[in-house]
Image (cartoon, grey):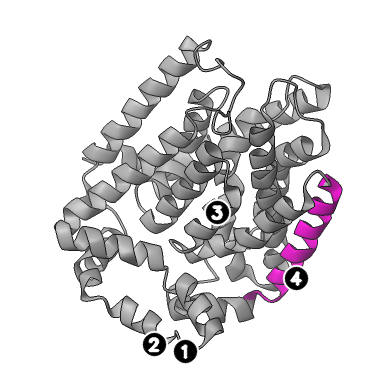
């Protein structure tokens, strides 16, 4: 079947994985609903967003750009049209605080459902909770990016439409516009994996080189709120970490698919792999030519491990086993380091 991710009946043959998935989903729901959001950063920004969105100022700005095709296309992404439509709908029907909570619940529900048909659905949710920029950040705080990721994963993994998923996600959060060319490259390249890999790296490097121009075009209105001098993106260790995270994607791209994986699933994962490699190449290049570009876009380095790491062909070769073990240890290290720094304290607010 087109929408069945694993082989037929695989879900029914994994009661332990299904139970684990359900228990972790319950934990996510409890945390999403139980956190006292009054103490969270970004909360006031989203309250203001939902309160102001029904004014439709964003729609007036978009209509004013209709006369120019380029202006209209840029406006669709830079104004994050689907996010604004979502904020307008919820801001009209609910009070701002309820709209925020509903958004948190919807984005996490989409992620839980997106991974449900993966071979081991509990593992992706563990990664979602474990990675520093996962549930603790994009799942509870940075909701535009979290909702965009959730839509991308759901449309890709449940509908096998990764190109459509990237297009929709980019109209929710502008940074996902970077994924569009990589997704198109994967789709057009088909089984020519080396071609897809080469084109992704070339396009990523060129895009990073033009990063300042593109940021002014698509995200310039937010330029003043970013500080290039802060964050781990200025550390060369950030680049090395990204290159390490690329290993599962390279392994999947350069090895033959396993026999029991559905063709539609293979194509979908290959597309996400090319996006992952493209994002990593972009982030690594940006470190040297435009550090600001390595910020929010760099989140995808770890977030795309959610579907990729659990489905890599780790049992088919010794290299797969070694890469999987290395990434698992790396994620544990990052989680411990992040826990010491206090990122996971958000789980206990309330």
The residue sitting at 68% across, 25% down in the picture is 261
Magenta span main SS: helix
The residue sitting at 41% across, 15% down in the picture is 19
Separation of marks 1 and 2 at Cα, in angstroms: 7 Å
- Image-quadrant location for residue 52: bottom left
Q: Nearer the viewer, mark 1 or mark 4?
A: 1
Q: Which region shows up in magenta?
A: 193-211
Mark linked to residue 225: none
Tell me the SS state at disc 4: helix
The residue sitting at 27% across, 67% down in the picture is 49
Identify which residue, 221 or 347, lies in the foreground.
221
**Contact? badges 1 and 2 (CB < 8 Å):** yes
Q: Which residue is mark 1?
A: 67
Identify which residue, 107 or 240, lies in the foreground.
107
Tell me the SS state at disc 1: loop
Separation of marks 3 and 1 at Cα, in angstroms: 26 Å
Q: Nearer the viewer, mark 4 or mark 2?
A: 2
The answer to whether residue 208 is magenta is yes
Mark linked to residue 206: 4
Coordinates of residue 197 in the picture (x, y in percent): 80, 51
Identify the mark nearer the N-term, 2 or 3: 2
Quarter of the image with the C terminus is top left
Tell me the SS state at disc 3: helix
The answer to whether residue 205 is magenta is yes
Is residue 58 visible in the rendered image? The answer is yes
In this picture, is 349 found above or below 64? above
Identify the mark nearer the N-term, 3 or 4: 3
Separation of marks 4 and 2 at Cα, in angstroms: 31 Å
- Image-quadrant location for residue 118: top right
Mark linked to residue 64: 2
């Amino acid at each position: 079947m087109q929408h069945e991710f694993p082989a037929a009946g695989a879900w029914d043959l994994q009661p332990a994985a299904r139970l684990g998935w359900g228990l972790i989903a319950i934990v996510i729901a409890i945390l999403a609903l139980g956190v006292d959001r009054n103490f969270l950063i970004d909360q006031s920004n989203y309250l203001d967003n939902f309160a102001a969105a029904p004014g439709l100022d964003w729609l007036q700005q978009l209509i004013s750009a209709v006369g120019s095709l380029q202006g209209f296309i840029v406006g669709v992404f830079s104004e994050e049209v689907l996010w604004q439509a979502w904020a307008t709908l919820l801001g009209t029907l609910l009070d701002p605080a309820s709209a925020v909570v509903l958004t948190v619940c919807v984005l996490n529900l989409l992620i839980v459902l997106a991974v449900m048909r993966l071979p081991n659905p509990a593992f992706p949710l563990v990664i979602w909770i474990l990675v520093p920029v996962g549930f603790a950040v994009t799942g509870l705080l940075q909701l535009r990016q979290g909702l965009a990721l959730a839509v991308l994963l759901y449309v890709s993994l449940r509908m096998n439409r990764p190109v459509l998923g990237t297009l929709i996600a980019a109209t929710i959060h502008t940074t996902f516009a970077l994924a569009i060319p990589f997704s198109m490259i994967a789709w057009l390249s088909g089984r020519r994996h080396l071609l897809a890999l080469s084109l992704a790296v070339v396009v990523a490097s060129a895009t990073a080189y033009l990063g300042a121009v593109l940021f002014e075009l698509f995200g310039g209105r937010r330029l003043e709120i970013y500080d290039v001098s802060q964050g781990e993106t200025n550390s060369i260790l950030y680049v090395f970490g990204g290159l390490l995270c690329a290993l599962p994607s390279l392994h999947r791209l350069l090895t033959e698919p396993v026999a029991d994986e559905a063709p539609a699933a293979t194509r979908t994962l290959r597309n996400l792999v090319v996006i992952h490699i493209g994002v990593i190449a972009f982030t690594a290049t940006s470190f040297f030519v435009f550090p600001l570009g390595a910020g929010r876009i760099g989140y995808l380095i770890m977030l795309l491990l959610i579907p990729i790491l659990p489905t890599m062909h780790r049992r088919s070769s010794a290299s797969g086993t070694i890469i999987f073990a290395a990434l698992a240890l790396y994620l544990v290290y990052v989680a411990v380091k992040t826990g010491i720094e206090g990122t996971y304290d958000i789980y206990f607010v309330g």
